[in-house]
Each structure stands twice: as structure tokens, then as C-alpha cells.
Amino acid sequence: MADNGGEKKHDPTDHRRQKAREEGNVVRSPDLTSAVLLLAGVLLLDFTGPQVFRTLMELINEELTRSFEWQTDPRTAVLQVVRLIGKGSLALVPLMGGVLCTSLVVHFAQVGPLWLPDKLGIDFTRIDPSKGLQRLFTLVNVSKLGFGLFKIGLVAGILWMGVWSRWDSILALGAGSIETVGQFVWTTMIDLCRNVAAALLILSVIDYAFQRWKYEQDLRMTDEELREEMKMMQGDPQVKSRRRKIQRDLAAQRLHSDVPKADVVVTNPTELAIALRYDPLTMKAPIVVAKGASLVATKIRKIALEHSIPIVERKPLAQALFKQVEVGQAIPLSEYAAVAEVLKYVYQVQGKSISDLTKALK
């Protein structure tokens, strides 16, 4: 069956996700941020509003009741204005601080830590009128317009229902005191805003879920994109094949030069092969000059037979040396006795003197 290279049927790789993130392509819903900020602002205003109102009323009462003096000194007048602004701003700190913290938390929850200094510059293509008109009449923007109109209708419906449900109370306000009217207006405003914020939050969560799904779909990869990324990350398969062939050739050359220097080859008997060399006059302990498994082990045994190097089967010793010792390293102290026994056997078979060997490995 022919390969359809245009179908996005592969999940995005970590590299593709990271690249999209570095380009600023992340899932972020301004509507979700606005809805959370609106709801948080209403709740904070409901909690801090009375205190803010009392503080402002105290400032107004203080200014209206104290004796008024003409101030001809501009510096004194400025200090007085600054004092009033400072007291009023201090009352608003909990509200503004809560909104700011909420904004940071919502943004971090959506995007996470992201620093894109390249995006700080001016992109003149974004203010090009011709391209702006092209973006205006896209399917995405038309759908956003429809969604925005739906939200406007929803907000209007919630406000109308809220006012309609309180219509009798509104008509009865004419006989109430100023305090009663003020309390009713405040609680009604808070309730309506809270209901609107909750409805917008539900819609924004749905919109955010849709945007995340669409983001994942856009990041999916075609067969061609996946192949290109694999080439970029791991290299061209043909180049890798040639590299592996060169590495095998170099390893085979080392075997042909190192194995003939060995005094004995310890095997498993067929899966592992470790070539050992020992010179009592120049070495403190035997060293591994070559080792390998499977095909490499077969190659080591073949070279050993060609050069009349003894091959001794010792399964536990072969396994221990293969795991613990790298090529060019000396055998560990724990394997001295087993290796000495093998070398002693080889020396006896070859008719060599074993006195120096016995002294060196004691």
C-alpha cells in the first residue's frame, strides 16, 4: 500500500514539542485568564469592598470636617494630595495584589516558565494592513467572532435574568433608606458579576480544552516529518551504517593485532571470550587484551587457534572478567586465584617454568 506522507498519524516527539515551545507556540487562552481574573476580582471585591469603602469615607469625612486653610505654599499642597493618594492606595493593596497574584498563577499554570527574548522586538508583519485583512477573514477568526457574540448574548441573558428575578425588590426600593438601597445595589452587583464570571469561566475552560486538543493535532507528524526529524536527531541511516561498518573494521583490526599477544583465551565456552596476557617480569597482574560476546567471541577464538594460543573453558571466570574488566585493565584481586590456575595449566601444557608465575601471583 502506498505511504500517505501527508497524513499526520504520528504523535509529536519531545524535540518537536520543545521546538514549538521555543518558538512561542504554546497553549494559552486569554479568555481563561480573563474569566479567572474576573471571578477572583469579584470575590476579592466582595471580601475587601466594605473595608475599602469605609477607608474612603473616612478620608472624605476627614477632609470635609477639618478646618479649611488657604495654602499658598505649593509644596504643602502637593504633600497633602500625596498623603490622600497614599491612604487611598493602601486600602486598595489587597485587591490589586490579589488580582496580580492570580494573573501570574493563571499564566504560569497555562504556559509554565517560558522566556522568549526574541519575541520582545517589534514584528512589523503584524501591523501590515494587507496581511491583517487576510487574517481577519480566516475560519479561525470567524469562529472566534461567533464565540464572542455567543458570550455577549450569554452575559446579557444572565444580567437580564438577574434583574428580572429581583424586579419586585427593585420596585420596593423607593420606600427604603439610603443604606438599604446601597446594600441592595452592592449585593446585587456582586451576585450578578459572580454569576457572569462563573459562566465565562466554564466557557473558557471548554475553549482551553479545545485549544489544547487542536494544539496536539497540529503538532502531530507525517511520515516524512518523522523521518526528517529522526535524520536530524540521529543522523542519516546510510551514514550511520557506514560509521558502524568502519567501527567494526577497526575493532576487527584491533583483534588481529591484540589477540596474538595473549597467553590464553578464557571462554564461556561459546558466548564469551576473554584474551589474557601476563608477563611476570613487567606486569603486576594479568591484563585483558581483548574480550567479546557472540560473533566477536567467535572471532577471538578463531584468531587464537590461528596463532596456537591456548583456549580454556572456565564459565564463572569468563563471566566475571567480561562484566568487571575492560580491555587494557588488569584483572581484579578477587580473580587472581582463578586466573593463576588457568595460567599454571597453560604453562604446564606448554612446558614453561611456573616458578616465576607462582611467586608473582601470590
Image (cartoon, helix red, strand yellow):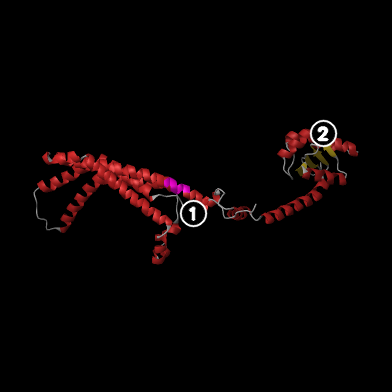
Q: Which residue is mark 1?
A: 22
The image quarter containing residue 284 is top right
Residues under numbered marks 1 and 2 in contact, where contact means CB atoms less than 8 Å apart: no
Q: Nearer the viewer, mark 1 or mark 2?
A: 1
- Which disc is residue 142 wearing? none
Q: Amino acid at mark 2?
A: Glu
Tell whether 86 sits left or right of 354. left
Q: Amino acid at mark 1?
A: Glu
The image quarter containing residue 294 is top right
Question: For numbered disc 2, what is the local secondary structure?
Answer: helix
Q: Nearer the viewer, residue 249 or 8?
A: 8
Label 1 to label 2, Cα distance in Å?
Answer: 62 Å
Residue at position x 28%, y 44% from top? 158
Q: Tell me the chief SS of the magenta region.
A: helix
Q: Nearer the viewer, residue 202 or 308?
A: 202
* Residue 165: percent from left, percent from top: 23, 39
Tell whether 267 sits left or right of 8. right
Q: Which residues are magenta?
A: 208-213
Tell whether 242 sits left or right of 113. right
Res 343 seen here: yes
241 in magenta = no
The answer to which of marks 1 and 2 sits earlier in the sequence is 1
Q: Which residue is mark 2?
A: 341
* Residue 49: percent from left, percent from top: 23, 42
